[in-house]
Image: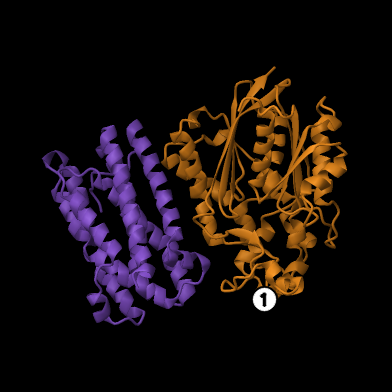
Chain colours: A purple, B orange
Amino acid sequence: MANVPLTRPVALTELGQATLRRLMRVWFEFERALATVPIIRRLDLGTFTRQDYQNLLLNLRPQVIEGSRWISRCASSFDREHSDIRSAILRHAHDEHRDYEMLEQDFVATGGEIDRILAQPKNNGSEALHAFLMFRSGEPNPASMLGAMWIIEGLGEKMAVNWAARIEELTGFDAHCTRFLRYHASNDDSHMDKLYALVDRLCTSDAVAAAVVSTAQIVGHLYAWQLQEIDDGR
Amino acid sequence: MTHAFLTSTGSFLPGPPVDNSKIEQILGLVDRKPSRLRARILKANGIQTRHYAIDGEQRTTHSAADMGVAAAKHCVDESPVPMKSIGMLSCATTQGDMVVPGFGSMVQAGLGIPGVELLTTHGICSSSVMAIKAAANSLSLGQHTSALVVVSELASRLLKHTRYEAAGGFGAMDFNSEFLRWMLSDGAGAWLIENAPRGRCLRLDWIHSFSHADSFPVCMGIGLPTDPDDVRTWQDFPTYGEAEAAGALLIRQDVRLLEQMVKLGVDGALRLIEAGTLVMRDVDHFLCHYSSHHFRGKIADLLDMCGASIPEDRWFTNLYTRGNTGAASILIMMDEFLRGDRARVGDTVLCMVPESGRFNTAYMHFTLVEN
C-alpha cells in the first residue's frame, strides 16, 4: 500500500478530534452489544462449539461477498472534488474484493460442504445491513459512509485479535480454518490509519460529523442483528 | 458536590516490603513446585515490592479489620477531629474476615466510635469509590459533618499454596486461576471527609461511575467452579469441601476478557468529556488504579488516540512499590501522593478506578484548596 496520499495525521482538527471521540464511544457501545449476542457470549464463556464456528462462517459469507459492491459503489459516488477519497476507497475495495473465497475455504477446512456455504442465503440481519450499506453508498459524496467503514474495519481487527485465537482454543480447529478472520489482522491496521485521515478530511461540519456517527451506530446495530440471527433465525 | 472535602488520609501496609524473589516464600510453593508463570506475570505487571498480612507459614499476622483500624487511626490521629465524633463510617473490602456481618461492623468495633451511621459496600476495586461517594453524599445532604472511609484488603489468604492444593494442585492450575497470585497483596487506606474545608485539603468536585455487567460475563471473581459448563456457584455445592475441590473458592481472573477493561476505562472518560464534566487538559494530577504496568501504556495510547491524553509527568502511582491492594489501592495512593506535597493550591486531581469484576469504572475529581 505504498504511495497512498492519505495517512494518519499527526494532529486532527478540533471537530475531527471530537468526531473521533464520538466514534470511539460508538465502537465501545458496539462491542458491548456484540458481547450480549448469544454466539459471542459463548465465545466469552468458553462454551463455543465447532458447530457454532461453522454457523458463524455460513452467516458471514453472504454479507462478505456483497462487501465489495457497497465499497465500490461508495467510491464511485464521490465526485471530482473528492478524488483522493475515491482512490483510497477503491484501493481498499480491491484489497478485500475476494476475501470471501478465503472464508469459503475455511468452511471447507472445518469439514463443511462447499455446496452448503455457496447455497446459504442472507439472514434477516445481513439483508438489512446490506440494503442499508447499498442505499447510503449511492448518495452523492457519501461522507457518512465513513461511519460504516469505522465499524466494518474495526471488526476486522477485532475478529482477528479477539476471535480467531479464541475459536482455535475452544474448537481445536487450527489456523487453516481461521484464515479469513486472521487475514484482517495484518491488513486492517493500515486501513484504520487511513480512516483517521478520512475523519479529518471529511468531517468539515457538525452536520457531516453527526451523519458519520449515526451511520456508525446503525451499521453496528445491523451487524449485531446479523450475528443475533445465527441463534434466532434457526 | 461542593460540600465534601478530603481533609486527612492514612494508610497501613503490613510487615516489611516483599520483593519478587521472596513472594513464593510467603505464599508457599504449590505441591512444592515453583510456579511456571510467576516471572512472566511479574514482568508484565511491573510490581517490585508489596506487603502481606501472612507470614512464611501462611499464618495471618493482621486481620483485614486490624489493618483497616490501623489505617483509620493513622488518618484521624493527624486531624483535630476526634474519632468519637465521626458521624458516618463507610467501609469497603473485597473480602473481610467474616462472611457476615458487614466489614464495617468489625472496623467500628476496633475504632470504638459510638452510635455511628454504618455502611459496608460490596464489590472489588470500585467498592472503595462506592463507599466514598455514599459518605460524600451523606455530607452533602447535611446528615453529618464528618465521615470516615476505611478500605482494607487481605488477598493473600486466598493466594496461599493450600488453596490451590485443595483445588487439584499444581497440575490443575491454569493462567486464569494463577494470574492474581502474582498481582494482589495486602494493605488498608482511610480518608476523612468533612463538610467544610480544613487547612490545605482536596475539595471533591464530583464522582461518577459506569457499570457494564449487563454486557459482559464475570471477569474476576470467587464462587464459580473451574468447569465453564458447571453453572453452580459455591454455596450450591453440598459441602464447602466439594466447592473448594471444584475450584469454586479460588480467586480467578478471565485474562482474555480483561482486555475490555482498558476500553471501558477510556469509554467512561469520553462520556465525562462529552458531558462537559471532565476537561482532560485541565487535569494536573492523574491517579489511575491500573492493576498492572501492562495496562498503563494501553490506557495512554487509547487516550492519546482520542485526543484526550494526559502528559506522562502528571501520572502518579505507587503500584510498583506498594503493590495492587485492590479496593484499598486508590486510598493508599492518594495518601502517598498528598504526603509527597506534589500538588499546589488550585491543582486538580483526577482518580480513575476501573474494576474488572464485572466491569465497573469509577472516576473522582478533586481540587486542592486552602482555607
B276 versus A76 height, above or below: above
Residue plotted at (29% across, 51% down): A149
Dividing the picture into quadrants, the one containing residue B193 is: top right
Q: Position of residue A214 (x, y in %)?
A: 31, 44
Is A69 or B171 nearer to us in this picture?
A: A69
The quarter in which the N terminus of chain B is drawn is top right
Whether residue B20 appears in this view of the structure is yes
Whether residue A175 appears in this view of the structure is no
A121 versus B315 height, above or below: below
Considering the numbered disc 1 on the image, is that residue within a helix, a strand or a loop?
A: helix
Q: Amino acid at mark 1?
A: Gly
- Crowd band around label 1 with a 10 angstrom C-alpha radius: few (<14), some (14–19), many (20+): few
Is B169 or B353 nearer to us in this picture?
A: B353
Residue found farthest to the left: A80
Instruction: Give the residue pinned by disc 1.
Output: B171
Q: Position of residue A87 (x, y in %)?
A: 18, 49
Chain letter, disc 1 residue: B
Dividing the picture into quadrants, the one containing residue A128 is: bottom left
